[in-house]
């Protein structure tokens, strides 16, 4: 297990533990999750490492819930967990500040870099094949949103979508470390309301969860207004 500031003890599979121990994943310990925001909120020095572990934990809980509702191929489920852990592998320093920089008239993309690293780094590929027992291409298809007949539509949006586990973790984590009350959302309650639409194969929320979804939307609005887009943090980002 790993002790997390938000969720307490998070159980790690041998595959997840091996992933944490790779050179590229250890790099994430040196990247602040919210970049220059710590200049305004001194506690906001948490990292992409802890966030990635948190997303892995939430996706694991969501998969436990969803597998009771629909059939998910075991290798695809493992690939989804691996994708959750590796989704920020290629993240740049200073949070999203560098996303605004263009090289050869092309904007930098930490998602594309994450995919490129997973496809090319021998250590990551070995961990995926030997520990997770999944094809690296399956993981990158999930992260890239590439159509793959083996991957159900709802698994793509579990990591990157309107109400994904990435968003639920960073709202709670960033609110905790900045010390503000309005970013906290009921994660387990929202997971309990997840379902899959039989016609479209989309990830949906049952009617009982509408209030929880509204609280997430409002929490995101307040976090952007008062934390992520705080004028001092934006000035530092521009500099």
Image (cartoon, rainbow, N blue to C red):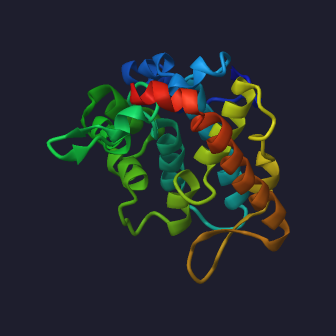
Left or right of 8 on screen, residue 135 = left
Task: Classify 38 as above or below 140.
Answer: above
Image position, residue 220 (x, y; %): 67, 48
Residue at 40%, 59% (x, y): give it: 145
Quarter of the image that includes the C terminus: top left
Task: Classify 34 as above or below 147.
Answer: above
Front residue of this view, candidates 104 and 142 = 104
Image position, residue 188 (x, y; %): 79, 48
Work out whether residue 90 can be spotted.
no
Question: How many marks do you count on the picture?
Answer: 0
Image position, residue 37 (x, y; %): 57, 25
Front residue of this view, candidates 231 and 198 = 231
Front residue of this view, candidates 35 and 235 = 235
Residue at 36%, 49% (x, y): give it: 140
Q: What residue occupies the far left of the structure in this picture?
A: 104
Front residue of this view, candidates 35 and 120 = 35
Task: Classify 193 as above or below 216.
Answer: below
Image position, residue 5 (x, y; %): 73, 23
Task: Classify 136 as above or below 191.
Answer: above
Q: What residue occupies the far bottom of the structure in this picture?
A: 199
Work out whether residue 39 can be spotted.
yes
Residue at 40%, 69% (x, y): give it: 149
Where on the picture, by quarter, is residue 52? top right
Where on the picture, by quarter, is residue 173? top right
Quarter of the image that includes the N terminus: top right
């Amino acid at each position: 297990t790993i002790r997390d500031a938000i969720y307490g003890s998070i159980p790690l599979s041998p595959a997840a533990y091996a992933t944490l121990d790779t050179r590229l994943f250890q790099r994430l310990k040196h990247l602040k999750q919210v970049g220059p925001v710590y200049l305004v909120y001194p506690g906001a020095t948490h990292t992409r490492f802890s966030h990635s572990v948190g997303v892995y934990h939430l996706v694991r809980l969501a998969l436990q819930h969803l597998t009771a509702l629909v059939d998910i191929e075991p290798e695809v489920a493992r690939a989804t967990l691996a994708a959750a852990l590796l989704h920020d592998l290629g993240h740049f320093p200073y949070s999203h500040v560098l996303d605004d920089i263009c090289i050869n008239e092309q904007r930098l993309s930490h998602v594309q870099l994450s995919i490129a690293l997973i496809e090319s780094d021998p250590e990551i590929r070995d961990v995926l094949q030997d520990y997770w027992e999944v094809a690296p291409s399956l993981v990158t298809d999930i992260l890239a949103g590439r159509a793959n007949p083996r991957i159900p539509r709802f698994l793509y949006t579990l990591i990157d979508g309107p109400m994904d586990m990435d968003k639920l973790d960073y709202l709670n984590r960033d609110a905790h470390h900045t010390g503000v009350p309005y970013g906290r959302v009921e994660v387990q309650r929202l997971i309990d309301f997840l379902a899959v639409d039989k016609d479209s194969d989309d990830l949906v929320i049952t009617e009982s969860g509408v209030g929880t979804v509204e609280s997430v939307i409002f929490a995101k609005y307040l976090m952007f207004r008062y934390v992520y887009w705080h004028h001092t943090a934006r000035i530092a980002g521009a500099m």
